[in-house]
Image: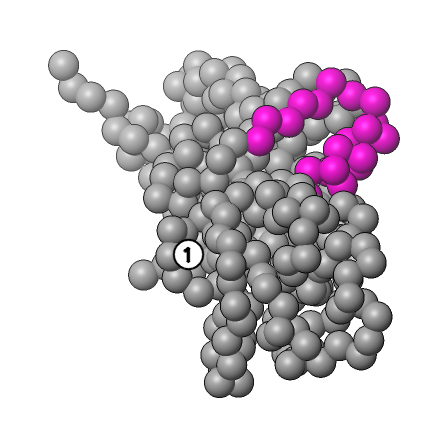
């Protein structure tokens, strides 16, 4: 059996415009196309259907019987496509019942989720969140397959299939317990290095950003405790004389004393990542609007890839 040729869907919009306007020129004006472009599209349709489709007369372009037989199906298909697009773009957070799946590390979740929940609560909606562990080795697949809506990370996730925006910028501080001796005197680099420190990392070994900043100064801190979980740091600091270099908001949330780091270190930037296929999803757009109000740059960028 002979297989029907594949036809560019844009040609059907041009067919509909010619049928409605009865003129190639006016169809081009409606679609913001040149008359030659419309003529070329009609030629391709005529070839695909093996029929003139429209005949030029003194009164304009008149549809042939073949054109009359397909116009209803074409218009129905175009309407379905438009409705499908509108369904993706239209999202009413007050009426929606949807669970967004987010991937983040424990420290990032602690800084981000309370703010996001407060923003969502203002809509009194049926929106739910599910926070899943961040697995960098599989996050691209999970975003592409729809298993995740967003991933949040301080490290760049470089892939041309991903888009991203900065949502948080956190100042790093030295956190100690209330009444710690370090808070009773001027705090310089030597004072910082004289403290015993606790450090958290998902990696089993290797320096953190603070250690790298100190290396550039030719200095090194004394880490007496290394943890795999960031949220353990504030509890350890509150109960001991150890110090932790953590985001300021996290320290304050746990009632710790904060001291400015006596050396230059960049802030912690948290970025949201999502797949290009979800870029026009109404729910995704709404969440990104909420995230954009958190004080980050809020500018969408395309992730680079190799």
Left/right placement of residue 82 relative to residue 256 reads left
Q: Quadrant of the C terminus?
A: bottom left
Taking the spot 61% from the left edge, 54% from the top edge, the residue there is 270
Residue where numbered disc 1 is placed: 158
Q: Residue furthest left?
A: 1
Q: Quadrant of the N terminus?
A: top left
Q: Residues within 10 Å of mark 1 (few under 14, many from 20)?
A: some
Extent of the magenta region: 112-131
Please, which colouring scheme is shown? one colour
The answer to which of 280 and 124 lies nearer the viewer is 124
Q: Residue furthest bottom?
A: 218
Is residue 75 something one can see in this rendering? no
Please tell me whether residue 260 belongs to the stretch shown in magenta: no
The answer to which of 199 and 129 lies nearer the viewer is 199
Q: Position of residue 237 (x, y in %)?
A: 67, 51
Taking the spot 38% from the left edge, 51% from the top edge, the residue there is 204
Q: Position of residue 33 (x, y in %)?
A: 54, 51
């Amino acid at each position: 059996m002979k297989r029907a040729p594949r036809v560019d869907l844009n040609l059907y919009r041009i067919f509909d415009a010619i049928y409605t306007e009865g003129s190639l020129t006016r169809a081009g004006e409606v679609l913001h196309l040149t008359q030659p472009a419309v003529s070329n599209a009609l030629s391709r349709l005529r070839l695909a259907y093996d029929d003139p489709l429209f005949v030029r007369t003194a009164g304009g372009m008149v549809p042939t019987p073949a054109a009359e037989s397909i116009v209803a199906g074409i218009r129905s298909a175009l309407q379905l496509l438009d409705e499908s697009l509108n369904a993706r773009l239209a999202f009413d957070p007050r009426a929606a019942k949807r669970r967004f799946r987010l991937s983040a590390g424990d420290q990032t979740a602690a800084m981000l989720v309370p703010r996001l929940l407060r923003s969502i609560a203002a809509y009194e909606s049926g929106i739910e969140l599910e926070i899943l562990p961040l697995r960098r080795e599989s996050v691209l697949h999970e975003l592409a397959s729809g298993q995740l809506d967003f991933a949040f990370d301080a490290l760049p996730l470089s892939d041309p299939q991903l888009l991203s925006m900065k949502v948080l910028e956190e100042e790093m501080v030295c956190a100690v317990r209330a009444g710690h001796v370090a808070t009773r005197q001027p705090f310089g680099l030597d004072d910082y290095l004289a403290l015993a420190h606790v450090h958290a990392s998902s990696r089993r070994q290797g320096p953190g950003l603070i250690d790298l900043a100190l290396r550039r100064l030719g200095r090194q801190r004394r880490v007496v405790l290394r943890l795999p979980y960031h949220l353990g740091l504030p509890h350890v600091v509150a109960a001991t004389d150890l110090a932790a270099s953590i985001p300021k908001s996290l320290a304050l949330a746990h009632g710790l004393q904060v001291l400015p780091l006596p050396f230059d270190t960049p802030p912690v930037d948290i970025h949201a990542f999502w797949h290009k296929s979800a870029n026009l999803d109404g729910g995704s757009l709404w969440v990104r609007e909420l995230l954009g109000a958190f004080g980050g740059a809020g500018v969408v960028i395309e992730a680079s890839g190799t």
